[in-house]
Image: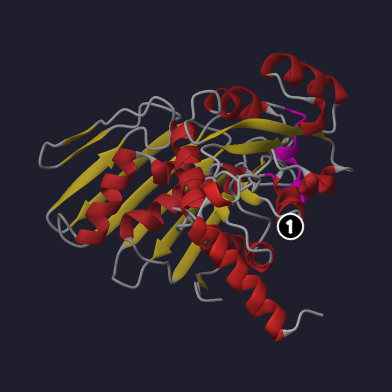
Amino acid sequence: MTTRRQFIRTTAAGAAVLAAGTAAFPNLIIPKKKDRLGVALIGLGYYSRDLLAPALQVTKKCYLAGIVTGSPEKAKQWQEKHGIPDKNVYNYDNFDSIADNPDIDVVYVVLPNNLHKEFTLRGARAGKHVWCEKPMAMNAAECRDMIKGCRDNKVKLSIGYRMQHEPNTQEIIRYGKEKTLGAVRLVTASAGFRDSRTDHWRLKKAMGGGAMFDMGVYSLNAARYATSEEPIGVTAQQFTTRPELYSEVDETMLFQLEFPGGALANCSTSFGMGMNTLHTVCEKGWYRLDPFQAYRGVQGVTSTGKALNIDTPNEQAKQMDEDAAAIMDNTDVLVPGEEGLRDMIVVDAIYQSVKEGRRVPVDSGR
């Protein structure tokens, strides 16, 4: 047990070392602050393989340091392609030993939705900062557990809402906050594509499948950031044209949101049809992004004739660099776990509305 006197003595000695500088202590090793953070991708599916891994080749503040996969074949391919050493390759069983690896600063959870909570908490307990893909979890209760787990382990948690890092999107967020064209009155947000896969985890309810969990959070998040408010009520309807595929989960979801300032939102999402538009009507005009959630080429226009067309060559790289900078500078991440929680509170209400066939009040403070 360290006594108070020993603590003061030790602290004073440390202060003397810092005051004297390394010249007086030539053998003293002071850890160098990293100029780039090592990232380990958990899950090596399409998004990791085709988007995150290439983005990590051009990021300035982070790099691909490790991988976590259940497939030895994938691990070998990734090692050969990206030069990942054996010591930075993990599977789902030995993942917790990543705590002993100083090469890894951040773990990025890119797994089916039902595994987001487990690996976020395991990453946090290992002392690693966590980036988690959206939707954050299966429900709001899991989100709260994830936020608490990261807070308790003193690591940062960021959710992969890359659009909030995108400049044209940030411009309309600013319009909503500053009421550039007056108060927002109506938001229309639609996100979807036709998915014809017949054997995929997104068709399975237990794994967090369905259009609402996948593309629907784009529409929902857009309605929230366009109004700069939290919904107070939701009414939703669920449809399918292919019940042979979508017997467990939603193929198409329509939902209407009410906001405390009087704004309304008509939102839609689907695995049955392509849609990609965000249109905001205000008291004194409107603005539109079309597409509003593409990997590149987000663009739009306002009723005043202003073009919204700032190009971002690699949205994933921008997102990860900005999140890495927040970790290195110990500042707030742009999209913390609380943002993912707010979406999931509404998603829970959407499914409740479908089940009960009625309007459901939304309490964002739950």
Above or below, 63 relative to 339: above
Q: Quadrant of the C terminus?
A: bottom right
**In the current view of this chain or complex, which residue is farthest to the front?**
24
Instruction: Please state if 180 lies on the left or on the right of 357 as rendered.
Output: left
Residue with the mark numbered 1: 121
Report the front residue among 66 and 261.
66
Q: Residue at x 37, y 55 (%)?
A: 225
Secondary element at image label 1: helix
**In the current view of this chain or complex, which residue is farthest to the bottom?**
4
Residue 280 visible in rendering: yes
Instruction: Please state if 146 lies on the left or on the right of 339 as rendered.
Output: right
**In the current view of this chain or complex, which residue is farthest to the top?**
80
Q: Which residues are magenta?
A: 198-209
Percent position (x, y) of residue 4?
Answer: 69, 85
Report the front residue among 299 and 105.
105
**In the current view of this chain or complex, which residue is farthest to the right?**
93
Residue 343 visible in rendering: no
Amino acid type at image mark 1: Leu
Report the front residue among 304 and 19.
19
Q: Quadrant of the N terminus?
A: bottom right
Instruction: Tell me, yes or no, whether the highlighted magenta stretch contains residue 208.
Output: yes
